[in-house]
């Protein structure tokens, strides 16, 4: 199939899906963007979400992708996770900034019935789920100052057209209120 020379070829996965050989194979085959489902860099939260790698491992992996400088690198972050609060959410955004990612996609946790998390919430076995609303002083403006609000759900970084999208975000002067 003929492709435009500047088409985007994205590889999506989780930290555990990749080693150096697999990354090189993807790049050599023409991949020019990696989108990694990080969800959170916080080790305690990652453990609750059954992620097999801890926070420092996830950070090191993302840094290694960025340092290759052969593809755009973005990650998904979730808000409303069990044990997450405005501080840990802000820390995740600051880490994403410090890694030098090309973009961050922000999503609200969707607790579905009949899933392990859905059943735990229903039975009161887990607490700290913020649900689908997080209103707090905006870490994107205060702690992650290089992000600029470009629209209701789009945040960009200068140089390189990096972006952050937030499902359902409503920008305010000094806060981000994310409601779905």
Image: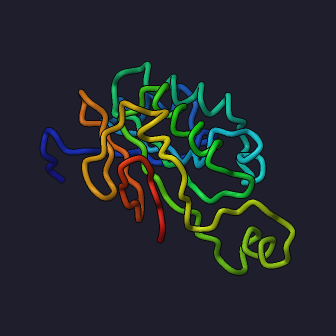
Examine the image and state in which quarter residue 58 appears: top right
Q: Position of residue 107 (x, y in %)?
A: 49, 58
Q: Position of residue 109 (x, y in %)?
A: 58, 63
With respect to residue 8, does 60 lie above or below?
Answer: above
Give the residue drawn at x 54%, y 31%. Answer: 95
Depth order, front residue of 50/98: 98
Examine the image and state in which quarter residue 30 appears: top left
Most extreme residue toward the front is 173
Q: Position of residue 176 (x, y in %)?
A: 44, 53
Tell me: 158 left or right of 112: left
Give the residue drawn at x 65%, y 62%. Answer: 130
With respect to residue 84, does 59 lie above or below?
Answer: above
With respect to residue 39, does 70 lie above or below?
Answer: above
**What is the basis of the colouring in this image?**
rainbow
Depth order, front residue of 53/1: 53
Q: Position of residue 147 (x, y in %)?
A: 36, 37
With respect to residue 7, does 58 lie above or below?
Answer: above
Depth order, front residue of 75/138: 138
Number of numbered discs visible in the structure rendering = 0
Give the residue drawn at x 73%, y 39%. Answer: 43
């Amino acid at each position: 199939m003929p492709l435009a020379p500047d088409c985007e070829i994205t590889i999506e996965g989780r930290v555990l899906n990749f080693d150096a050989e697999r990354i090189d194979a993807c790049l050599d085959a023409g991949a020019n963007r990696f989108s990694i489902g990080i969800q959170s860099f916080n080790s305690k939260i990652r453990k609750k979400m059954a992620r097999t790698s801890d926070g420092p491992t996830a950070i090191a992996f993302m840094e290694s992708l960025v340092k290759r400088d052969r593809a755009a690198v973005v990650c998904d972050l979730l808000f409303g996770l069990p044990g997450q609060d405005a501080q840990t959410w802000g820390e995740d955004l600051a880490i994403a900034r410090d890694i030098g990612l090309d973009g961050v996609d922000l999503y609200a946790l969707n607790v579905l019935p009949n899933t392990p998390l859905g059943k735990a919430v229903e039975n009161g076995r887990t607490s700290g789920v913020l649900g689908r609303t997080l209103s707090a002083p905006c870490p994107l403006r205060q702690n992650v100052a290089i992000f600029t609000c470009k629209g209701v759900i789009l945040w960009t970084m200068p140089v390189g057209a990096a972006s952050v999208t937030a499902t359902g975000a409503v920008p305010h002067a000094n806060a981000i209120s994310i409601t779905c």
